[in-house]
Image: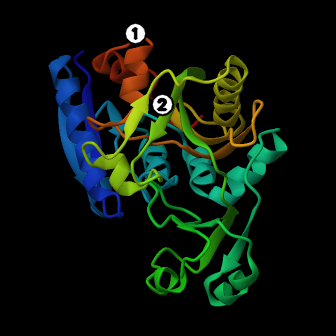
Amino acid sequence: MNKHIAVLMGGWSSEREVSISSGLACAEALEALGFQVSKVDVDRNIPSVLAELKPDVCFNALHGPIGEDGNIQGLLNIMGIPYTHSGVQASAIAMDKVRSKDICLRAGLSCPDGFLLSRNDISLLKKERRPFVIKPKSQGSSIGVHIVRLKDDYLPFVEKWSYGEEIIIEKFIPGRELTVGVLNGDALCVTEITSESGFYDFTAKYEPGGSKHILPADLPEKITRKALDHAVLAHKTLGCRGITRSDFRYDDTQGLLGGLYFLEINTQPGMTSTSLIPEQAAHAGMTFPELLTKLVETAQCDL
């Protein structure tokens, strides 16, 4: 427990505040375990900060671009500092929803039909069958995700768009929201997420009472097994390590067993008081400090 751990948090993405919440929670738990902990609010001076601190391990609590897309991972590889969570390639691919979806489709997962559209061509959506989903190519925490229903006017939303010139358009999958955590290649459990708004958006994710987490989810055994297996398959196919969380939609509106659709994988899942991964770990009999210890013990640079 005498390791010096630098907990990386903050940064300058739109998920900065969530990252700080995750980072502070992790730092407090690691300090209670007896580790020497340095809390680092990441800015563009991070190389010299780490060179001065000389930590044994970096605990990556960053969310969004820079911390989740392979950039910080590449820097830590160069500096030779072991770090938690996935490496450069897996992080970059997982953050790109188009590439990760294509790879997972090839691996045998079912995904919602969709396509990539230039923001300049948004008028083409006039003929798109509703409901459909608009979302950024590379963002997390449901930032920029918008469901366009039968009589919705999506133009005001797109006019304020600030997430790049390319937009993902996907078929909306009705039914239930499911998520599965995977730790070091093993699935934890299936959680069903419900929200009064009917959509697990940024507010539902992070505001107290914004959503309800039901675990284990009350599902047919076949669907539970499929969700667990598919989360592990996505984790391994993309070359992830440490902890990930895969999100699914389960369409049970047509009766029988319905269909299970993989939406995306998150290589930097939240570690706040309302986060899903600590809940799933607890359900599996693992305390929050034990979860963090496992992540620290398996920290590494890319080989």
Tag 2 residue = 300
Q: Amino acid at mark 1?
A: Gly
Q: Is residue 295 visible?
A: no
Q: Is residue 165 visible?
A: yes
Q: Amino acid at mark 2?
A: Gln
* Label 2: element kind: loop
Q: Position of residue 139 (x, y in %)?
A: 49, 60
Q: Position of residue 72 (x, y in %)?
A: 43, 52
Answer with mark 2 or mark 1, whichever residue precedes in sequence.
Answer: 1
Vertical side of 109 occupied by 95: above or below: below
> Closer to us: mark 2 or mark 1?
1
Residue 89 relative to residue 41: left or right:
right
Q: Position of residue 180 (x, y in %)?
A: 55, 31
Q: What residue is drawn where x is 59% and y is 65%?
A: 137
Residue 68 relative to residue 302: left or right:
left
Answer few, some or many: residues within 10 Å of disc 2's Cα (few below 14, many 20 plus, some between 14 and 19).
many
Q: What residue is drawn where x is 71% and y is 52%?
A: 101
Q: Residue 57 — which label?
A: none
Q: Do tag 2 and tag 1 residues touch (Cβ < 8 Å)?
A: no
Tag 1 residue = 285
Q: Nearer the viewer, residue 284 or 290?
A: 284
Vertical side of 232 occupied by 173: above or below: below
Answer few, some or many: residues within 10 Å of disc 1's Cα (few below 14, many 20 plus, some between 14 and 19).
few
Q: Quadrant of residue 276?
A: top left
* Label 1: element kind: loop
**Which quadrant is home to the N terminus?**
top left
Q: What residue is drawn where x is 69% and y is 20%?
A: 225
Between the C-alphas of marks 2 and 1, the distance is: 25 Å
Q: How is the image coloured?
A: rainbow
